[in-house]
Amino acid sequence: MKYEYIKQLIEQGINIIPLNPEKTPKKAWKEYQDKKVVTIIESDHYGLICGFADIECIDIDLKVLPSKILRDKFIVELGDLIKDHIDDYKSKLVIKKTRSEGFHFIYKAKNIDGNQKLAKVKGYTEAIIETRGVGGYICMYEDVINLDYHQLQYITNEERDILINLCKILNEVSDEVIPIPIKVERQYNSNSKTPWQDYNEKNNIFDIIGDEFHIVKDLPNKTLIRRNGAKSPHSGYIFKDSGCMYLFSTGTIYETEKLISPFTAYTTKHFSGDFSRAASDIYAKGYGDRKKPEPVVIKSKPVFEETGFPLDIFPDQVTNYLNECARTLQNSIDYMGAAMMWVGSLCVGNSIRIEVKKGWQEPSTIWMAVVGEAGIGKSPSINSIIFPLEKINGEERRRYVKRRKEYDEYKELSKKDKLTVMEVEEPKRTQFIVDDVTIEALINLHSHNQNGVGVFKDELAGWFKDMNKYKEGSDKEQWLSSWSGKGIAVDRITRQSDYIGKPILPVLGGIQPNVLAGFFTEENIDNGFLDRMLFTFPELKVETYVEEEISQKLITFYSDFVQMLYVELKKIVIYNDFGDVDPNIARFDIEAKREWKRIFNEITEKQNSDETTEMIKSMMAKQKSYIPRFALIINTIEAAWEGYDLFNITRESILKAEKLSKYFVAMNEKMLLSNMEATFTRTVLRGEKGNVMAKIKSIHAKDKNFNKTTVAKELNISRQTLYNYLKDIK
C-alpha cells in the first residue's frame, strides 16, 4: 500500500500504524486508541487501529474451514443474510479480502464495542468471525471489493446491531450439553430414557414457543425466529439437528445465549423454571422409560396367620414376593418388611425430600434393627430383600477397581507417553452400600455418592458399641446429625476436608436381644439415639424343612423391580451449579395434609398424657419425623410401580405410614419391656447365692409370671430343665 495514500488517510482522521511482515506492530500503538497519529514511518505493511474514530471491523477468518467449498458456502450464506437485512449494504461497508482468504467488513458506528468472538464452527476452537473494535487493529490490504478505506462511513446503531446478530446466527453452538440442571446418570442402564430425554425427542420446541415467535427464514442447519413485535431482524434460531433454541433477544422469559431444549422451554413457560415439578408433570404424562418388570401371577396365594408387620403398605406384587419367601424359605415377614423399608429409603435417597410444611423437610433416612436370637433367620430374611441392590453395588465396586487400575497405570506413564494415549481421569467410588466403615471414610464415600450411602451390617453390635463412645465431635454426634438431615463434615490437617450438606445414611442390621439390652443406657436414652432406632422383634421359632420352592420368575420380577426403582429414582437427582445435590420436593395433597394434622395431634396428646411413660414420650416425638419419612418411601415405591406422581403424597400413603408407625411403636415398647425383664432377672439372679434351684425359687417368689426364656438363658439351662425345676417348686 502506497505511503502517500496512508498519509492521506491519516490527514482524514484515521489512525494507522506500521506493521512487520508477520503483521505485528513495529512500534507501540495502544496510545493511539485515544490519541491522533500525526506522522508515520514508511513501511511495506500497515495496520488500521480500530476503536479510534468509531471504526470497527468484522473479521471473517475462513481458513478455519477445511475446504474451499465450505469457505465459499459460508461467505455466501453470510452475504445473503446481510443482503436481506441491510439495504444497499455494499455502499455502506468497506469490504476487503485478506491474505488468508478471509474478509474484513469495516464501518463506523457510534455504538462500537471491544473485541468479540461472534461465531465458531462446531469441532473447532478458533473463532471464524470476530470483531475488532476498541483495543484492536487489523492489517490493511490493497484489494478493493467495493469501497476503499478513504470511503469509510457511518452506519446506524440499528444497522450495526443487525450486522453483529447476523454474524452470531452462523455460530454453531455445541448441542452436546443442554442446560437442564438435572444430572442424568446412566451407569446402570444406558438404554433407558429419562422423562426429559423422551420429551425432547417427541416434541418440537416451536410447538411450545410458537405463540411468542414466528419464523423469519429457513436455513440448511437452523431456522431463524423473531419474537412477535420485535424490531430486530431476528431474535434467535432453532438448530435442526438438536431441536434446541438459541436466543439473542432479552425480551422473553427464556434465557439468552444458552441452548434451550424443548423440556427447558416447557419448564420455563409452565413451571417458572422449577425442573422437579416439570419432570414430575411429564413423568405422570407417560414420558420416560419405566422399565417396569412383568408381574408374576401366583395361582394359589398362601394364607398366613396375621403378622404384626403391616404387609399391605407395599404394592401387591411386592407383597406376593414377601409371602412366597415366608412360605417357601421360612423367612420372617417382619424382618423382610423392615428390610424392604430400608431398600426404599436407600433408593429414594436424595432424589426426593418431603416437605411437611414450609420450613420443615424430612429426608428418607431410617435406622432399622432386626432383633432375634442367633440362628432364628435374621440374615436370610434380610438378604432375600436387599440382594438386588447388593448386585448393583458389587458391579460398582468391580467397575471402580478396574478404572482405578487404569488410572494408576496412566499416572505411571511419562509425560511423553501420556501425549500418545487418551487421558484417564481419576475414578470416583460409586459403591453405595457398606458394612464396616468409619464415619470419616463414610463421609468421604458419600461425597462421591451424594444420593446416599446405605449401611448394612449382619451384626449391629459393633455399630452400637461405637455409639457408646460419645464425646464432642465423636462419631455418635455425626450420626445423630445425619439422621436429622443436618450437614456432617470431616476436617483434616493433611488433606482436603469432606462435607456432606444433605446426608442420607440408612442403617440396617441384626442384633440379639441380650446384646441389645446392654445399649439401653441412660446416655443413649437421653441423647435420643435409641428413639431414632426402629426395632422389629417378632415371636419366632425355628421351623422344619419345607419342600416347596419359590418361583424363579418371581425372584427375577422382584430383582428387576428393585433395580428399576433404584435406577429410575437416581435419574431424577438434581444438582445445583456447585455440583451439590438439590433434592426434589414431595408434598402432601389436601387429604393427606388433613390426615397428617390428625395424626400429629394424636401423637401430641399421648406426649402430654400422664399415662404415657417418659421413654415412650421421647420415642413418640421421633415418630413425628418418621411418619412423613415412611409416607415418602411408601408413596415413592407405589408411584414408581403404578406410574403415579412421585412428588404428590397421597392420603393412602400417609395412612399406611401411620399404620407402620404404630407397629414400630409397639415393637419399641416390647423392646423396652424385654429389656426391663432382662435387667430385673439379671439383677435378681446375680444377687442370689446358692444353686440353680435356690435362684429359681427366689425369682419365682418375686414374679410368678417371669420370662422363662430370659431366666433359662441367664442360668445357662434349657427351658425344659427350668420347667422341671418349677414343677418341684409348685
Image (cartoon, rainbow, N blue to C red):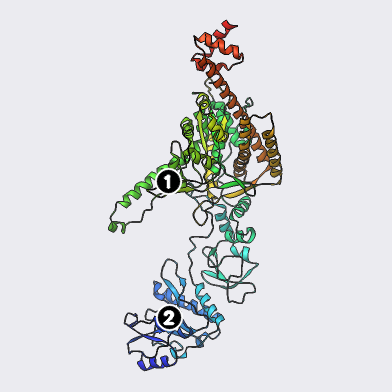
Q: Is residue 408 above or below residue 6?
A: above
Residue type, numbered disc 1: Arg
Quick one: SS at disc 2?
strand
* Quadrant in the picture for residue 156: bottom right
Q: How many marks?
A: 2
The disc, 1 or 2, on the residue closer to the chain's N-terminal end is 2
Q: Which residue appears at 52% of the width and 51% of the height?
A: 581
Q: Position of residue 170 (x, y in %)?
A: 49, 72
Q: Is residue 402 left or right of residue 521?
A: left
Circle 1 — which element? loop
Residue that badge 1 annotates: 429
Looking at the rendered structure, the kind of residue marked 2 is: Phe
Q: Is residue 701 above or below residue 168?
A: above
Q: Residue at x 49, y 54 (%)?
A: 579
Question: Mark on residue 103?
Answer: 2
Q: Residues within 10 Å of mark 1 (few under 14, many from 20)?
A: some
Can residue 647 be seen in the rendering of this structure? no
Looking at the figure, which quarter contains the C terminus?
top right
